[in-house]
Every structure is written in structure tokens, then in C-alpha cells.
Image: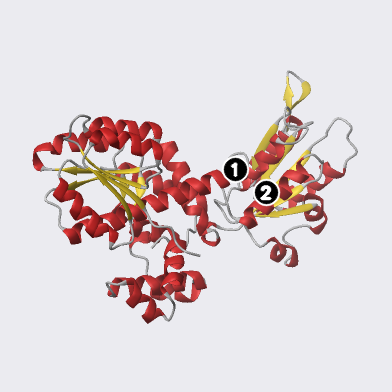
Amino acid sequence: MKVRSPRVLVVDDDKYLLEVFKISLEVLDFEIDAISDSGKALALIAEKDYDLVFLDLKMQPIDGMQILKEVKKVKPETTVIIISGNSGLDDALKAVDLGAYHILQKPVQIKELQFFAKKAWEYHAIKSELRELKDAAFSSKKGNYITQNSTILNSVDTALKMAESNINILIRGESGTGKKLVAELVHQKSARSSKPFIVVNCNVPENLLEQELFGLNTDVTSQTGKISGKLDEANSGTILLDEIGELSHSIQSKLLSAMQANNPKRDIRFISTTNIDIEETLKEKLFREDLFYRLNEVTIKLIPLRERPEDIELLFSHFIHRFQKGKEMRLSGDAFHLLKLYRWPGNVLEFKNVIHRAALLTKNDVIEPIHLPDEIQFRNRKDDMDLISLEEVELIHIKKVLNRTTDYKVAAKILGIDAATLWRKRKKYKI
């Protein structure tokens, strides 16, 4: 399949500069419209869908600032680059605040222009692809669970199908994979949604957990009284037992007795989570089989973030919007590659913290590797090579070849693939 050429509009009253743009960018297989009449620019922008618009600010009869505002209003997806001389630098900086991508300063050299245009096109292509992914993933945003990974989507769909039943669910996955989010989603989509959703952290001292679950008998003014527990509070609703692998044998026995008791006053749906290999605890008799099979009528598995690198951009966009409301921010190519290669032992929770930190550290709208924690910046890939996927090995090798060559055709030859295949792999890995 033929790759579409970028569609570019250049607006500048310097006809010599327009000729430089045409010669420089047509060599790169860009489709160019170059005009010196700013009055005609608005009509062209309304008529055609341009990927990139190079725009001089100092023009008549309509200045570039007006054109920029109109582009952002009628074609907000278009990437606008400002062409500026030193005298107009202040206005150019204002234009960037209004949504322009970058500033290209005069005088413009051909090599610099070609390099800059390629970078602007790569930025536009990544941004367009992310927008398409977000649109495609709209129906995949289940509650607060954001993903486009097919394995996760299947797991969440299974959870949703189980929601209307009273079946007990065990959700398995590493810490930070969103087990609580799925549990909340099941409750929200169930007939119990208007009833209590009670969360119990099982990783607390046994005496405190026993009191929290079952309540406490106490003596009040010489009369027998009782402080209710979470099992009482969850009546008619859902109780989430978070990390059931931490339950002591004593608590397991009491919980099983409570579940087996024929108590017409207690109607509870149990959802449990675990981040451990619970089959091993069953083999070692650390967890009761009879309780396990009562809690595990259906299993939902959530894979770790390192197995769903396609979610990195989607999650980045989600968290940046949360942390930097009203401000657009993006990842540099190098930062993006580091995030995709990192193993994420803390999964989405760790990812959220890393992005929040980076957003606070950067002084502009671009997150660079320097804004990422040391363990991500300086990961020793030699030690990890036997622990990474084939895709990661391929990405590392392709990136190494591209860093040592100046021409994509030469790189493709070294890699033993054709140029079209290399382009597809660059697009896949966002290189």
C-alpha cells in the first residue's frame, strides 16, 4: 500500500522563500501549495485538509496571527509552524502560545528546512494516530479503565458480562494493573449499584482485620451490644476483598463459615483480588481450597503494562489531561521509546506517578528523557535482554541502525528489509 504524502501549505510574501520551500520539500515527496497572497490562504485552508501549514506572521492584507487563529478554529488538527525573523520573534512566541507547533527562523537553510519538516511531519503523524486511537478506544473506555489492548478488553468484557449475575469473581494481576477499577466497574454495572460497595484491605494485622470484617462484641451499660463489621455493612451490595492471599488461616475459616451460613439477612456479592500465584499457596496449604473455590467462581486476569505497550500513548494522554488541564503537552521521541521499553514493575500506578513528576519538571510543552526517573533513563538493557520481548529486541536493533546511518534506504539495506517495511516498523514503534 502506498504511503500518503504530507500535504503542506506555505504562506509567505517572500516569493524567493516560497521557491526554497517548494524545491526543498518536493524532494521529500511532500505535496506543496505555496502562496504569497495571505488573503487567499484562508480560502485554501477551508477548501483543503493540510497536514502542515508554514506561516509568516508579517503579511498583508491578513496577517499571520489572524490566519493562525482561523486555522485553529476551522482545522484544529492542522500543525502550524511559524516562519519568523528576529524582529518578529515576540509575536512568534505568542503564536506558539496560541497553538503553533514551533518557530522556524529566517534565513532558512535547505538542510535545516528538510530536517525540520520531517520532524514536524512525524509529530503530526503521531498526533493524528493518537487521535485515531483515542476515537477507536472510546468504546473501550470501560468506566475508568483505559485501554486498547485486546487481551485487557476481553477481560473487561468478561467482567461486564458477569456483572448482572451474583457470581463471585476473583480478579488476578500484578499490583497497579487496575484490579480495583474492574471491581468497581462490575459493581456499577450490576443490579446492586445503588447498594454499598465496601473495600476491605486484607493486608492488615489479623486482629484488626477480624474486627473490621466481623464486627466486635462489646459490653455497653451492662447490656450486650455489637459494633457491626464490613460484612454487615455490605448487605445487599458488594464487598471487595483486596489481596486475599494475605488472609490468615483463622480469618479464612471464619470467612468460609460466614459464607456458608444460611443467613437470610445477609446478601453479599464477593469480589476478590490477588497479585500472587495463589495456586502455589493452595499447594502449600496456605490457603483453603474450599474458600478459594467459593470466591473464585469466575477468574478475570489483567496483564501487566509491559505486555501492552500500545497503551502507553493513550495513558499518557489521559494522565496529562488530568495533571495539566488546558495545557497541551507531548512526549519527545526519545522519551516515548524509553517509556515503551521500561518494564513498569508498578504498572499503571507507577506510570501515573512518572508522568505527574515529568509534567511538573518540564518548563515547556515537551517531556524529554531528562524529566524521567533515573531507572527509566539509564536502564541497563544488557542485563535485561533475556527478559524482554522479541518486539523490544527488534526496536532496539532498528533504532541502533538508524542512529548509525543517515539514510533510510541504507538502513533498510543493512536490516535486510525493503524501505516500505522499514517505514511500517518506524510507524509501529514511533521511531
User: How many residues crowd mark 1 within 10 Å: few (<14), some (14–19), many (20+)?
Assistant: some
User: How many residues crowd mark 2 within 10 Å: few (<14), some (14–19), many (20+)?
Assistant: many
For disc 2, the marked residue is 156
Q: Residue at x 30, y 58 (%)?
A: 118
Q: Is residue 201 visible?
A: yes
Residue 196: mark in rendering = none
Q: Position of residue 38 (x, y in %)?
A: 24, 35
Front-most of residues 319 and 382: 319
Say left or right for 18 vs 28: left
Front-most of residues 329 and 61: 61
- Determine whether the residue tagged by mark 2 lies in a helix, strand or loop: helix
415 relative to 60, above or below = below
Q: Earlier in the sequence, mark 1 or mark 2?
A: 1
- Determine whether the residue tagged by mark 1 lies in a helix, strand or loop: loop
* Identity, as a three-letter code, of the amino acid under mark 2: Val
Q: Residue at x 31, y 31 (%)?
A: 69
For disc 1, the marked residue is 141
Cα separation, mark 1 vs mark 2, equals 10 Å
Q: Position of residue 78 (x, y in %)?
A: 37, 42
- The quadrant the C terminus occupies is bottom left
User: Toward which corner of the image does residue 416 lie, by quadrant?
Assistant: bottom left
